Image (cartoon, grey):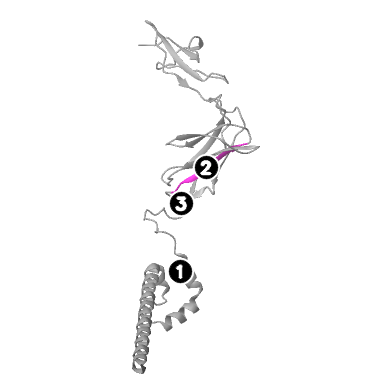
Amino acid sequence: MKAKEYCLYEDDMRTCSDRQKPLKPGDKAKFFIKRSSAEKYSCTYLSPTGWSEPSDPLQMVMTGFYRKPSLSALPSPVVTSGGNVTLQCSSEEPLNRFILTKEGEHSLSWALDSEKKSSRLFQSLFIVGPVTPSNRWTFRCYGFYKKSPYHWSEPSDPLDIQFSGPSVSTSPPLIGPIPTAVTWVVGQQSLMHDYVRGCPDLCPFDPQFLFSHPQHCAVENLIRICVAGLVLVVLGVLLFQAQTNQRRTRDAART
């Protein structure tokens, strides 16, 4: 149905703040909004049968109310493809919430409460990822007060994420760090060489073997030492018993 007139409503939806005739060709109108305190807008149109129902409300955000915050990447804006990046939005104004926006074809946004880092610095840390070169990763951030969520600061300077190095490997991580015993062995190489030459049956001093089988070598050596000690104890007991029996035999012969 052809519209004759359009009307723009603000916040309370009770009073028409602006009227416009439809553009030609087509049934549409343009409203030019100057700096305003309004946060929500809706419109209706007039047809031969009367005024229409109001449109769904449109939340309007206005920027430029506060100085622009600072946006930086930690530790660097150069990241490896497939990794995550931490973005820090900060301001000297006591803004208690920050918005991070991703520009480009696939635009996104994130919101976080700010944290007071010092008497003059408020910030939020956004962890974004995984990021890949297949998309453009350009970010800006804004700050605002919760009491006025549609009045934002000026946008920060744009921050472009750059990529360097190969993609992050999907291979499973190594199981634990290199044992500290290996570090000690490498640091005592000459001493260990002498020890191994004197006991050829023990694990050879092969750094590659130690790095790949550190526990195997230690356990094997420990078992052998324990067995050798047990044998010595048994031999000692047998020797003691033999000496005792000999003394008893001599004593019996004398009597």
Q: Residues within 10 Å of mark 2 (few under 14, many from 20)?
A: many
Q: Amino acid at mark 1?
A: Val
> Which of pointers 3 and 2 indicates the residue nearer the eye?
2
Residue hosting label 2: 87
Residue 157, image x, y percentages: 57, 38
Q: In the rendered image, is residue 185 in sight?
A: yes
Location of residue 180 in the rendering, given as x and y in whole percent from the top left corner: 47, 65
Q: Quadrant of residue 222?
A: bottom left
Q: Nearer the viewer, mark 3 or mark 1?
A: 1
Tell me if mark 3 has few (under 14), some (14-19) or many (20+) residues whose alpha carbon lies within 10 angstroms of its own: some
User: At label 2, which amino acid type do we have?
Assistant: Leu
Circle nearer the N terminus (2, 1): 2
Distance of label 3 from label 1 (alpha carbons): 31 Å
Q: Is residue 202 visible?
A: no
**Magenta-colored span:** 83-91
Horizontal and vertical percent position of residue 181: 46, 68
Q: Earlier in the sequence, mark 3 or mark 2?
A: 3
Using the numbered discs, state the Cα–Cα distance from disc 3 to disc 2 in whole angstroms. 15 Å
Q: Earlier in the sequence, mark 3 or mark 1?
A: 3
- Judging by the rendered image, the residue that carries numbered circle 1 is 182
Residue on which disc 3 sits: 80
